[in-house]
Amino acid sequence: MRVLLVLEATLGGTSRHILDLAHGLLERKVEVHLIHSLLRADEGFVSGLEGLCRTYPAFRQHAIPMNRELSVSDFGCYLKLRSYIRDNGPFDVIHAHSTKAGFLARLQSIRSTTRVVYTPHGLMTLNPELAGFRRRAVCALESMLSRWTDSVIAVSSVELKCALETGIAPSTLTVIPNGIQLVAPAVQMEQREKIRASLGLSDDTVCIGFVGRLVAYKEPQRVIEAFACLKRLTNRRVRLALIGWGPLQPELEKRVADLSLSSDVSFLGQVDGRRHMPAFDVLIQATRFEAFSYVLVEGLAAGLPAVTTRVGAAGDLITEGVTGYICDPWDPVTGAVLLKTLVDDPDRRSVMSEAAREISSRYSVANMVDSVAGLYESLCSQASPDALRQIRYQNSPGNLQ
């Protein structure tokens, strides 16, 4: 099987997903080509891509500078993508990841016999602030493009519901959750001891951790406000550690100073969140919207009970009082009360830690890759190429009535 992966958002969970998927497919002897953009690439994607190239000489990757926003450069990107497909195809499957890549790749498929798969990794319509004409336009575009898509993968039940409300054809939809690399508890304990020592955390300090980009929709300021409330509610020694980077950092650091919390809050920057999470005792996230939070499932895999907003897969992963708490609707005082429940009761944290590890074990990279590869095989064994070509041609813009 020959597969072309197309990706624009080469950062965060999306970049991790594509690297894991490419690695898993290559291990299964699938020929993998990757078209990507480096305009928003993070360090993890760049180093991971270099690792794939070293490990698998047959792996092909090519950069096309795709912008996140609509722009006149999109036409040039479309032509470059079409040229790559012409020169290196045919492919059995083109799998587009993220909104922009999904738009450009699916336009290539109108008269093609190649199977087309699309994983949004967070539909634009998940954003509650997308309203009015812009929301209607996005819904119309996603609905139209779904006619040229053999399968749309939602990564959580929340995203599936959103996809149906957006107007994506139900017959194309399937749910395949993201997967993580599971780490043995003994390795995590070793990481915990080293990292806590490097952060100067005493054994009796309860460390609350946040992992995510410091951008508006991730709401890191909510985390700081909840931690400030917690400090007033508990007599325990507590520390807040924020892993991530972004434009809000100067503003957040100023807020921490204004609250006289500078000695209690650490900004750790672009460190490896997966490696550092075992050093935490509790995970907190307060994002407004999410399709599937890698941070949440990796935190559970590290044995961390979580306090989170009701976003993405939180409803699937968090059982109230068992693996964590969902703060819905969010406010700093309620978030702080839930944190206090965990901070003040180490025995409760220990019991919840085991439950967290158990549920996270269902979300492995191997399961994710098996499901995606199985979807590819199922699609390629369906209707004949001639029938598929006719269907696509009939649904192309010039032939729609």
Image (cartoon, rainbow, N blue to C red):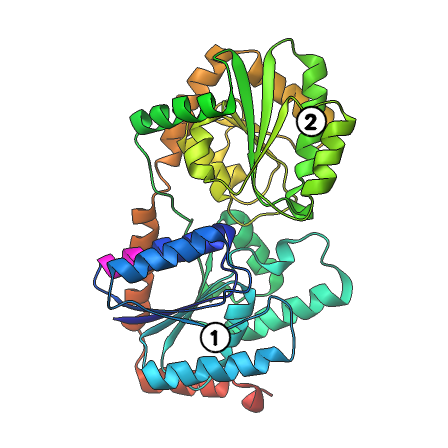
Q: Give the quarter of the image for residue 109.
A: bottom left
Q: Nearer the viewer, residue 263 or 226?
A: 263
Q: Return the x and y of residue 250 as percentages of the image width and height.
A: 71, 41
Q: Which mark is residue 226?
A: 2
The residue at which mark 1 appears reads as 105
Furthest-bottom residue in this view? 398
User: What's the residue type where badge 1 is placed?
Assistant: Ala
- Left or right: 167 as drawn, with respect to 7: right
Q: Return the x and y of residue 340 as percentages of the image width and height.
A: 62, 17
Where 236 falls versus 11 (above or below)?
above
Residues at marks 1 and 2, CA–CA distance in whole angstroms: 42 Å
User: What's the residue type where badge 2 is placed?
Assistant: Ala
- Residue appearing at x 35%, y 39% in the figure: 362
SS at mark 2 in the image: helix
Furthest-top residue in this view? 235
180 inside magenta stretch: no
Which region of the structure is painted magenta? 23-27
Q: Nearer the viewer, residue 236 or 251?
A: 251
Q: Return the x and y of residue 249 as percentages of the image width and height.
A: 67, 42
Question: Of label 1 and label 2, which has the lower sequence position?
Answer: 1
Q: Return the x and y of residue 294 as percentages of the image width and height.
A: 47, 43
